[in-house]
């Protein structure tokens, strides 16, 4: 008999239990922590940029070549792309669950590399970013200047140099995006001056490339040579330029009279911003905003803690008038949720111990079931880690449910040993335990198998529901198996060592048993009566079933319950082509509304950033709103839950003229949906025009808004954004000796900003951009 082996060798049973507990503790320290199991399919994102291009152009020259190559990559389920009117392209490739995300990214990179040669030079020069897509933002950190001494550009550049480099090395952090631009050498061309001197944009860019370059000049005295040299010297040329004054001295052209045309003669130069499409605010002032996403398999709490420790470290080197705030922190809700469940877990353990003690009546008998709880529960974590599980609400719920089950087998052993001891006064505890295990080994194994038969099928459910609850059922199954092992090894060993005959039970125990016996007898009589009145019992049962079915029909359904996570995201839009100045005015109105809401702690804004599409547009803005602590909001008068705050913000934002706004919470499960709303795609499978697709989408949206269940249906799709169409008279251009390439380059450079190369500043490399002066590209006549 297996148990007899451990009864005679109790130290061996103790070692097994200690080993299970230790590896469980180690697993707890290293396992990822999340709110829910990772059910989001692996995704890889491809991002490209073509300045000045329309959404239609981006789709044609970037999207089509890349998508044709990427389509069908191993393990792909589907892909979806977005092309925006600021020249940005986003492609998300979704893979089957279980696919290695690193290998998926490699496969996508290989496919994109094949398509890269078909892309325009401007796209390749700026680079194509390929990375694993993170489900949702982890943190958003705003760096700001309380006294306003630092500009947005200075804040962004300091953050990039001192913060972004540090967090790039944080394990578990997938991406970090600085919303706003850092330093860039801006070459503002004077078109009239260029025309009078006969200088083209191509000549300007070629001159910059030639004279702002790093060229290895070689060495003097390097062998082999005819004469042995005593010394060797490296030759260093001027290399990259580092100031606007140096760029002004670049020679663009030599005139027939021998005079030079310098870059400063045809352009104004300054160290400005790399781009002016988006910028951030914090509580109404200028800011640098960093949004971070964690890997799906990372420990979100640990990753967030490391980032916050880096923030504490760099506080010492921050400029005097600079500080930071965290207006968006998803780790707080995860911490609160996990902390609440752990508290419930501890309470459940204490209740089980108390109930076990009350019913067994003495401390010695209670010891074996009590010891079984931590061994079974803590040991479960080790096997959870082997299965790739995380510590989340679902697995912890499984452990809470398992608490009451894992002690059953140990109680069965203890009660049987106690009964045999009382029935056989001459037997020792060891003899009684051996006899007890002969009687209960079979029932322990059988009851465990029955419980496994209940929970194992849950792990086999198909779809996302199966992925969600597989960890729940498997966690319980592991705990059940470990409890059975404990009941066959540790519990009998403890019983043989500590159990004693208890001929005189405590007075309270006698009173309790007497009362419980009365309750048992009453229950028995009630059951007997019901058996005799079977018809009444069946009718009552049928009524109860009907009531359950009726209530089930009326109860609302949801995949997971919506929770108050303490943060909101505001997506705001003005009519197409609205300027950033109008968008800033919209932000100002929204900030006034937010400042007057008592439930809001702080907020940060990103002007020019579209939270729904992920692109940049002058008519869009996004705000991250951090609500006050849950306890603080509960103490306030009125309803200040996340849902209530979002509802009243939507009502107030709706009143802003010519603006569309929506305040939404985070999705219940990261990566599934946009905010706490429903998202779906309308696909054209018949090759219709973009306008026809838009008409169908708007009709569907109008019908959806009529449904009482839907608060607000909206779309970011636009097929008729106002634009001008440029027709080039090719024959006249040829007669005038102007090539089509020169015309296209002039328009792209003057109006879209052309990246040339890099320059050095403060030990870092920044980009050089050429563009026409602002007053020379304000209207169509320019």
Image (cartoon, rainbow, N blue to C red):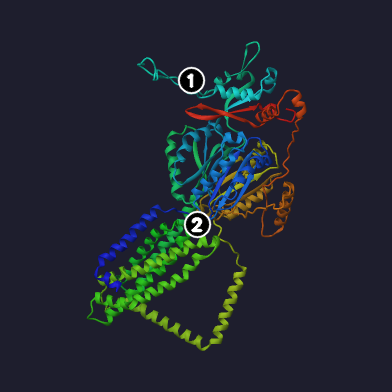
Measured from the top left, where is residue 526 in percent x and y? Answer: 48, 84
Q: Give the SS element for disc 1.
A: loop
Residue 36 numbered tag: 2
Measured from the top left, where is residue 234 in percent x and y? Answer: 42, 20
Measured from the top left, where is residue 760 in percent x and y? Answer: 51, 26
Pointer 2 local density, CA inside 10 Å: few below 14, some 14–19, many at least 20: some
- The answer to which of 112 and 413 lies nearer the viewer is 112
Q: Residue at x 47, y 68 (%)?
A: 455
Q: Residue at x 44, y 37 (%)?
A: 315
Q: Return the residue found at the far top.
A: 257
Residue 586 numbered tag: none
> Answer yes or no: do the residues labelled 2 and 1 have beta carbons within 8 Å?
no
Please name which of the two marks, 2 or 1, marks the residue nearer to the observer. 1
Q: Which residue is mark 1?
A: 237
Measured from the top left, where is residue 220 in percent x and y? Answer: 42, 18
The answer to which of marks 2 and 1 sits earlier in the sequence is: 2
Judge whether residue 648 can be spotted in this image: yes
- The answer to which of 485 and 218 lies nearer the viewer is 218
């Amino acid at each position: 008999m297996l148990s007899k082996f451990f009864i005679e060798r109790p130290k061996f049973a103790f070692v097994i239990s200690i080993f299970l507990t230790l590896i469980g503790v180690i697993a707890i320290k290293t396992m990822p922590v999340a709110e829910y199991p990772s059910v989001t399919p692996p995704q890889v994102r491809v991002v490209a940029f073509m300045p000045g291009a329309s959404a239609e152009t981006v789709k044609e020259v970037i999207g089509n070549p890349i998508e044709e190559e990427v389509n069908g990559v191993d393990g792909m389920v589907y892909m979806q792309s977005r092309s925006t009117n600021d020249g940005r392209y986003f492609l998300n490739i979704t893979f089957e669950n279980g696919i290695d995300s690193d290998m998926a990214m490699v496969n996508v990179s290989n496919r994109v590399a094949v398509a890269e040669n078909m892309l325009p030079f401007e796209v390749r020069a700026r680079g194509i970013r390929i990375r694993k897509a993170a489900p949702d933002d982890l943190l958003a950190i705003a760096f700001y200047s309380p006294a306003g001494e630092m500009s947005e550009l200075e804040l962004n550049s300091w953050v990039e140099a001192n913060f972004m480099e540090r967090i790039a090395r944080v394990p578990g952090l997938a991406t970090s995006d600085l919303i706003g631009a850092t330093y860039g050498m801006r070459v503002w061309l004077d078109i009239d001056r260029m025309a009078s001197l006969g200088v083209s944009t191509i000549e300007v860019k070629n001159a910059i490339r030639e004279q702002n370059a790093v060229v290895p000049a070689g060495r003097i005295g390097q062998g082999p040579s005819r004469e042995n040299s005593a010394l060797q010297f490296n030759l260093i040329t001027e290399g990259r330029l580092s100031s606007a004054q140096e760029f002004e001295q670049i020679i663009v052209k030599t005139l027939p009279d021998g005079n030079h045309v310098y870059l400063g003669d045809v352009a104004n130069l300054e160290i400005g911003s790399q781009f002016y499409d988006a910028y951030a605010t914090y509580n109404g002032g200028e800011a640098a905003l960093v949004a971070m996403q964690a890997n799906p398999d990372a420990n979100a709490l640990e990753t967030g803690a490391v980032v916050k420790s880096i923030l504490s470290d760099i506080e010492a080197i921050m400029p005097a008038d600079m500080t930071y705030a965290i207006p968006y922190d998803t780790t707080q809700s995860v911490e609160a949720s996990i902390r609440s469940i752990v508290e419930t877990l501890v309470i459940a353990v204490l209740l089980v111990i108390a109930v076990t003690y009350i019913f067994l009546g003495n401390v010695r008998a209670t010891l074996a079931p009590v010891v079984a709880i931590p061994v079974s529960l803590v040991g479960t974590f080790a096997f959870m880690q082997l299965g790739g599980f995380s510590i989340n609400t679902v697995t912890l719920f499984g452990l809470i449910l398992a608490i009451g089950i894992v002690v059953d087998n140990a109680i069965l052993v203890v009660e049987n040993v106690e009964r045999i001891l009382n029935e056989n006064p001459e037997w020792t505890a060891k003899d009684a335990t051996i006899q007890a295990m002969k009687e209960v080994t079979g029932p322990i194994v059988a009851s465990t198998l029955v419980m496994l038969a209940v929970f194992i099928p849950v792990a086999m459910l198909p779809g996302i529901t199966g992925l969600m609850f597989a960890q729940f059922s498997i966690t319980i199954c592991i705990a059940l198996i470990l409890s059975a092992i404990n009941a066959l090894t540790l519990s009998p060993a403890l019983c043989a060592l500590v159990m004693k005959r208890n001929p005189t039970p405590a007075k309270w125990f006698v009173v309790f048993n007497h009362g419980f016996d009365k309750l048992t007898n009453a229950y028995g009589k009630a059951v007997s009566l019901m058996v005799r009145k079977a018809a009444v019992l069946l009718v009552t049962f049928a009524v109860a079933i009907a009531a359950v079915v009726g209530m089930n029909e009326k109860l609302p359904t949801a995949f997971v319950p919506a929770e108050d996570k303490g943060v909101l995201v505001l997506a705001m839009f003005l009519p197409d082509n609205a300027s950033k100045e109008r968008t800033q005015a919209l932000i100002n109105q929204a900030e006034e509304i937010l400042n007057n809401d008592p439930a809001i702690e702080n907020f940060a804004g990103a002007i020019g950033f579209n939270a729904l599409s992920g692109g940049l547009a002058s008519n869009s803005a996004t705000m991250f709103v951090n609500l006050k602590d849950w306890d603080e909001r509960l103490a306030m008068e009125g309803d200040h839950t996340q849902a209530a705050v979002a509802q009243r913000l939507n009502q107030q934002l709706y009143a802003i003229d010519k603006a569309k706004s929506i305040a939404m919470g985070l999705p219940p499960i990261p990566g599934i949906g946009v905010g706490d709303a429903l998202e779906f795609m309308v696909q054209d499978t018949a090759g219709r025009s973009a306008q026809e697709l838009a008409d169908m989408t708007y009709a569907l949206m109008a019908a959806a808004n009529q449904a009482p269940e839907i608060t607000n249906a909206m779309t970011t799709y636009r097929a008729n954004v106002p634009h001008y169409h440029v027709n080039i008279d090719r024959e006249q251009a040829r007669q005038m000796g102007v090539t089509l390439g020169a015309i296209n380059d002039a328009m792209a450079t003057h109006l879209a900003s052309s990246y040339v190369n890099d320059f050095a500043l403060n030990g870092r490399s920044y980009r050089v951009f050429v563009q026409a002066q602002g007053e020379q590209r304000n209207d169509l006549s320019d």
